[in-house]
Image (cartoon, helix red, strand yellow):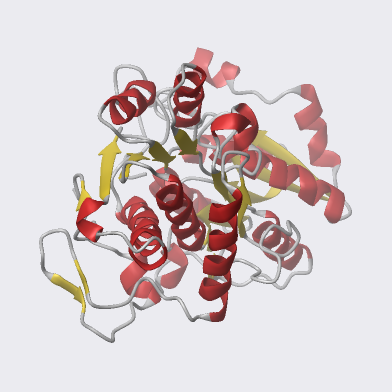
């Protein structure tokens, strides 16, 4: 999320509107209070809800912890409000560690960390901790969602009758490009290696709406974008945004008799919105990462770290150990589910590696030569979409 949310000074009225509830205020009395800043609402059935529920689980798992939070930290819901201002509010209520859950908060979290050297900060999806000049109290956390998005793409291609897959993307940055590319690679593998179909007959189109969720008048309407995909012949839409519009549209069209499905994103329970149309959901589980950092802060063993945590391959849906997961949906056929299980096993043991050459970028320039495998750095900083994908790279 590249837009800075550092804005104009807030008015007195705005300041009053962000005072936490009496319940949250009392959280300062806990032995270790941590604060959570969420870019979206705590009940978005996506990204922010996954963070919120992880925080509530930490309260159960680590004795003496208490979460306080502020959601809807974005320019549309809180115009002119800065991350440092909200951090000040959380600190005043006793927060000893603060999590910012969006790369849209990059500048604000960095500034707040420098202003509060006594407070520990976790920034989700950034990489400041890799830089020597960044504050010692600022660490980063992200899940290797690339694996689960490969599974999403695989499930989509195994389920598609038309070979036309739509990808509902948020905004364009390195993170979103690598996740969209991961979906494409998973879809291409299923299409060519499992189904043995002509790669030229697979269409993978990306449409970016401009942010992680719908902001009327600012972003494209994700509901309309999803409808456009289906109206243009796509029979599967994969969502890369925080909310479930693609799945809701798929469910509506399915009830009208269309043979279509969708894959939501982010949140373990996302399929519950429309189970009959859901092929499955790739989701983040923040409990292992949160546990690592919060326990380190409590034990006074904190150190600046950049963590990019992957799945627990033995049981990637174990919420205590696996930082990402994939849950099969009701719409996924038994044959597709069986093929997906084999694919997951191959990813886990390394016999299947999709970020491997020969692989070109969208502009036909070479990304990876034959026999080359991408490094973490190359994947993390993916500069373009890949050859075979339709859609903008910048």
Q: Residue furthest bottom?
A: 371
- Asked if residue 382 lies left or right of residue 65, the reply is left
Residue 96 in view of the camera: yes
30 or 329, nearer to the observer: 329
Image position, residue 57 (x, y; %): 78, 47
Vertical arrangement, residue 281 with respect to residue 140, above or below:
above
Where residue 146 sits, quadrant-wise, is: bottom left
Image quadrant where one finds the N terminus: top left
Image position, residue 161 (x, y; %): 37, 42
Residue under the image location 42 percent in, 42 percent down: 238
57 or 133, nearer to the observer: 57
- Asked if residue 271 lies left or right of residue 193, the reply is right
* Numbered label tally: 0
Vertical arrangement, residue 236 with respect to residue 97, above or below:
above
Residue 219 in view of the camera: no
Image position, residue 255 (x, y; %): 52, 18
Residue under the image location 48 percent in, 64 percent down: 135
Residue under the image location 39 percent in, 60 percent down: 195
């Amino acid at each position: 999320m590249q837009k800075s949310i550092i804005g104009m000074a807030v008015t007195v009225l705005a300041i009053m509107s962000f005072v936490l509830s009496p319940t949250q205020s009392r959280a300062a009395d806990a032995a270790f209070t941590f604060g959570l800043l969420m870019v979206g609402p705590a009940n978005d059935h996506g990204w922010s809800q996954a963070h919120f529920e992880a925080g509530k689980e930490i309260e159960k798992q680590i004795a003496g912890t208490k979460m306080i939070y502020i959601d809807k930290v974005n320019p549309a819901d809180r115009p002119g409000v800065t991350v440092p201002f909200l951090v000040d509010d959380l600190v005043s209520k006793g927060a000893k560690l603060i999590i910012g859950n969006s790369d849209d908060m990059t500048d604000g979290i960095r500034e707040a960390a420098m202003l509060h050297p006594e407070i520990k900060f976790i920034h989700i999806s950034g990489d400041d901790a890799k830089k020597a000049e960044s504050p010692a109290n600022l660490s980063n956390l992200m899940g290797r969602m690339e694996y689960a998005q490969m599974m999403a793409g695989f499930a989509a291609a195994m389920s598609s009758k038309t070979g036309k897959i739509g990808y509902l993307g948020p905004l364009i940055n390195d993170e979103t490009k690598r996740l969209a590319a991961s979906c494409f690679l998973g879809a291409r593998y299923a299409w060519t290696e499992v189904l043995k179909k002509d790669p030229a007959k697979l269409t993978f189109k990306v449409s970016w709406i401009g942010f992680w969720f719908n902001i009327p008048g600012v972003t494209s309407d994700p509901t309309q974008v999803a409808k456009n995909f289906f109206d243009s012949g796509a029979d599967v839409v994969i969502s890369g945004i925080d909310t479930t519009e693609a799945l809701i549209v798929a469910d509506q069209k399915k009830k009208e008799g269309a043979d279509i499905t969708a894959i939501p994103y982010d949140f373990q329970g996302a399929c519950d919105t429309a189970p009959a149309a859901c092929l499955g959901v790739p989701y983040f589980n923040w409990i292992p990462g949160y546990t690592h950092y919060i326990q380190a802060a409590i034990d006074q063993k904190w150190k600046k770290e950049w963590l990019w945590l992957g799945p627990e391959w033995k049981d990637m849906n174990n919420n205590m150990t696996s930082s990402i997961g994939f849950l099969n949906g009701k719409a996924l056929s038994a044959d597709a589910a069986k093929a997906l299980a084999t694919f997951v096993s191959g990813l886990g043991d390394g016999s299947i590696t999709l970020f491997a050459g020969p692989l070109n970028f969208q502009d036909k320039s070479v990304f990876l030569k034959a026999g080359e495998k991408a490094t973490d750095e190359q994947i993390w900083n993916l500069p373009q979409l890949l050859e075979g994908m339709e859609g903008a790279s910048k």
